[in-house]
Amino acid sequence: MTVYETDKSKGWLQSILDRVREFATEPPPAPPEPSARRPKVGLALGGGFARGIAHLGVLRCLQQHGIPIDCIAGTSAGALAGVAFGSGRPFEHIVKEAAAIRFGNFGQWRFSHMGLASNRRLEAYPGEHFGVRDFKDLKIPLAIAATDLLSGKAIYYTSGPVGPPLRASCAYPGLFQPVEYDGRLLVDGFVAAAVPVDGVRLLGAEVVIAVFLEAEKMDRPKSIVDVIGRSFSIVRLQADVGWRAKADVVVTPSVHEFAWDDFARTSDLVAAGDQAAMEALPRIRAVLQPASGEAHSSPSAATG
């Protein structure tokens, strides 16, 4: 503490000058330390038909425990979960809609040389059930992954109408006919982006939480749908290395006991996602710890 004393012999003006000189020689206060910037967090949601309902449990758990969700990228069922959650509708409404889904909500059997069924009905689904017709209607930025059947590349849609990209992202090869949109012939996003880590990175995510849905347990296929599904599950397992290396944390809900059309077991699927996210919380929080105020950039995924 500095004590100022007035010397009457110097006069009041000289006293003021002395105070000014003393103040000028004091070192300036140290600037406050800059607070560490929180990295932008994105979720990459993989496909899995009805098993995609588990994504809702993961999203709710993260939200309830204060984990930020700045953007989402989704493939197939993951894209639909991203639309539903990003709509901002109450969670109870989203779960109720999920439990009511049946094949007829999005598919019609229409045998052709390109597929067994059409999923054209899916285009209107986001608008009718969640009030989302355009990407700008979403509360959380979303990238929907589809696969260009001719180039073999993953295509990510982030603007414009939501219906056509969502339909393309869910056009399971062999089951649903390919979707012609934006000058491309598109099929299910999982073919080129099983878990769309690249898509959420394109939205600016610095920390990526990837959610992978296990294939259903199957002893022996009973239908052509089972054969197609099991075949692609095997292919998907072989492609795991690429996206896993780009994710920071991988969450794997235990959903192998659920069938591809187990929409009636919505509450169990949500619980499976919630449990997996709870178990992953310590790893997620560890990744989100600020490191010298710099954005996180670790490519190594913590799995579980």
Image: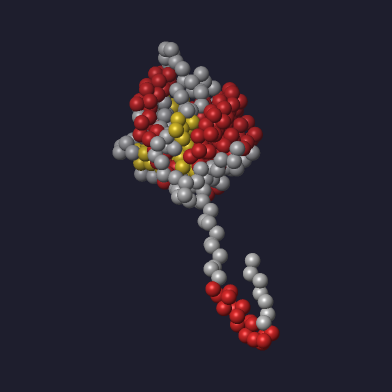
Counting every numbered tag in the picture gives 0
Q: Nearer the viewer, residue 215 or 165?
A: 215
On the rendered structure, is 59 left or right of 90? left
Residue shown at the point (53%, 53%) measured from the top left = 35
The x and y percentages for residue 259 are 50, 20
Side (left or right) of 35 relative to 230: right
150 and 49: which is toward the camera: 49
Please provide percent x and percent y for residue 146: 40, 37
Is residue 180 something one can see in this rendering?
Answer: no
Q: Is residue 186 above or below residue 230?
A: below
- Residue at 64%, 39% in the rendered image: 90
**Image vertical order of residue 119 relative to residue 21, above or below:** above
Q: Is residue 199 above or below residue 104?
A: below
* Residue lying at 57% horizontally and 42% vertically, measured from the top left: 87
Res 20 quadrant in image: bottom right
Residue at x 44%, y 37% (from the top left corner): 248
Look at the image and tell me whether residue 182 can be seen.
Answer: yes
**Residue found at the very far front of the displayed protein:** 9
Indicate the position of residue 280 as horizontal and vertical percent values. 52, 31
Q: Residue 59 at x, y = what percent? A: 56, 36
Q: Nearer the viewer, residue 248 or 289?
A: 289
Dividing the picture into quadrants, the one containing residue 132 is top right
